[in-house]
Image: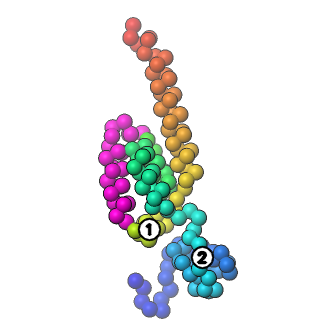
Amino acid sequence: MPPLGAAATGPTRPCSSCGGNILARAEICPLCGVRVAPAADAVNKVALLLLIFFLGGLGAHRFYLRRNLSGILYLVFFWTYIPSILALIEFVIVAFKSEVELQQRYPEGANSKAVVVAMLSGLVGIGLLGFLAALLIPYVAR
């Protein structure tokens, strides 16, 4: 905690009422005193837990948290079940974190559009691999 009177630092955003620059995690604007709504791209704990539980092995939660490289690695190695084990561990960790801790851990927020695009791309890629395998199996079996 900073000393009394010291300015807090961190990511900022504009106040929805007066337009002044405030900390991204601030609940009340220090300039106008109005309670501000949380940032639109704030991480939602319930959504994150659902993504980890149902699509964690495919890395959907990593795309949601804007961790695209690790999301791609989860997609590439999903067949080894290692990402599923990691997702189970992450599920337990996230379940015991508070909303405030999640916002501090992931200050850049969430990206739900990336989850949809990544999951559709991954499923289309898996479908194409299955289609190619179905075409090539008769030729290889000879």
Choose the circle earlier in sequence order: 2 or 1: 2
The image quarter containing residue 120 is top right
Which residue appears at 59% of the width and 79% of the height?
Answer: 35
Residue 81 highlighted magenta (yes or no): yes
Q: Nearer the viewer, residue 23 or 69?
A: 23
User: Does 100 sit left or right of 96 as displayed?
Assistant: right
Q: Is residue 5 shown above or below 70?
A: below
Q: Is residue 106 shown above or below 64?
A: below
Q: Which mark is residue 67?
A: none
Disc 1 marks a residue whose amino acid type is Glu
Which residue appears at 52% of the width and 44% of the height?
Answer: 118
Q: Residues within 10 Å of mark 2 (few under 14, many from 20)?
A: some
Q: Which residues are magenta?
A: 76-97
Which residue appears at 50% of the width and 29% of the height?
Answer: 127
Q: Confirm or deny contact between disc 2 and disc 1 (CB under 8 A).
A: no
Q: Which residue is mark 2?
A: 36
Magenta segment's dominant SS is: helix
Which residue appears at 44% of the width and 92% of the height?
Answer: 4
Disc 2 marks a residue whose amino acid type is Val
Q: Which residue is mark 1?
A: 99
Percent position of residue 36, x then y: 60, 76
